[in-house]
Amino acid sequence: MDAKPFLTVDEQPLTLRECLKYLQTSGKLQGFLGDILRQYVLDQELNTREDLEVNSAVIEQAVIDFRIQQQLTDPGVFQEWLNRNGSDYATFHSQITSNFKSEKLKSVITETKLPEYFIERKVFLDRVVLSRIIVDNKELADELKIQIQEGTSFEQLAQEHSIADDRISNGMMGPVSRGTMPDTVRAAIDSSNAGDLVGPIELENRWALFRIEQILPATLDNSQLKQALQNELFERWLSEKIQKMSVKLQVE
């Protein structure tokens, strides 16, 4: 008996085995299976946990807001949109509910772990806005530092003497993660304040002068940062769950 088609393309039936072979050939089979396992873990958690209930009024309001934002308030237009997306109202409503539950699950999973994870990542999350002048020898770096201290424009000297590409922007580097700085630079900057001139510091046989423009310490009061860390923790949790699973691929 021929295997039932999994997909039909231009009236040509493709079995599941053939589709999986195409994914394998394109190098996307692993990602495809990973997405399935990820959704499987989520569904198991959403359907078995009792601490993820969401107020029905919140869900209904989210449905209304979505339809307004997407200009789908007209019932006929909304139904056409559902048809184009291969969906129906029950499925759409279920997806909205699932999204809320997933966010609540993420909050529950990461709540106790977030403070420690934030501390662990903080050195990479803290940023410092820097300007710099890079030259080939220490004598010139020392001379430039004296000139700056005596009132010569840092920006002018950066344009005239710096060999770094950012000389065209007056030496402005922009925000730099503390965790990506060389140890010598980070140590010097950590003991300085905004507006201070730091250096000269030797970096790969060159000499650098830094001016600290602004210090931007990371904090969990930043909602975008908090959300990003929650996402990272949640994905780590999902990966750990998947790695512990016994998975067998069986195709007739």
Image (spheres, rainbow, N blue to C red):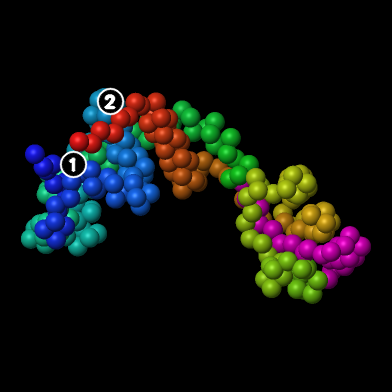
Residue corresponding to mark 1:
94
Q: In front: 11, or 220?
A: 11
Q: Residues within 10 Å of mark 2 (few under 14, many from 20)?
A: few
Residue 8 shows up from this direction: yes
In magenta segment, residue 135: yes
Q: Secondary structure at mark 2?
A: loop
Q: Residues within 10 Å of mark 1 (few under 14, many from 20)?
A: few
Query: In the image, which disc is placed on residue 208?
Result: none
The C terminus: image quadrant? top left
The picture places residue 216, in percent across and down from the top left corner, at 62, 50
Residue 42 shows up from this direction: no
Residue corresponding to mark 2:
49
Q: Quadrant of residue 156?
A: bottom right
Q: Is residue 36 left or right of residue 80?
A: right
Vertical order, 239 against 29 (above or below):
above
Q: CA distance from mark 2 to mark 1?
A: 17 Å
The picture places residue 96, in percent across and down from the top left corner, at 23, 44
Q: Quadrant of residue 17?
A: top left
The picture places residue 23, in percent across and down from the top left corner, at 31, 48
Q: Earlier in the sequence, mark 2 or mark 1?
A: 2
Q: In front: 34, or 54?
A: 34
Q: At 21% across and 58% down in the image, what residue appears?
A: 68
Q: Secondary structure at mark 1?
A: helix
Q: Looking at the picture, which amino acid does disc 2 mark?
A: Arg
Magenta residue span: 126-152
Q: At 79% across and 55% down in the image, what residue appears?
A: 204
In magenta segment, residue 51: no
The picture places residue 211, in percent across and down from the top left corner, at 75, 59
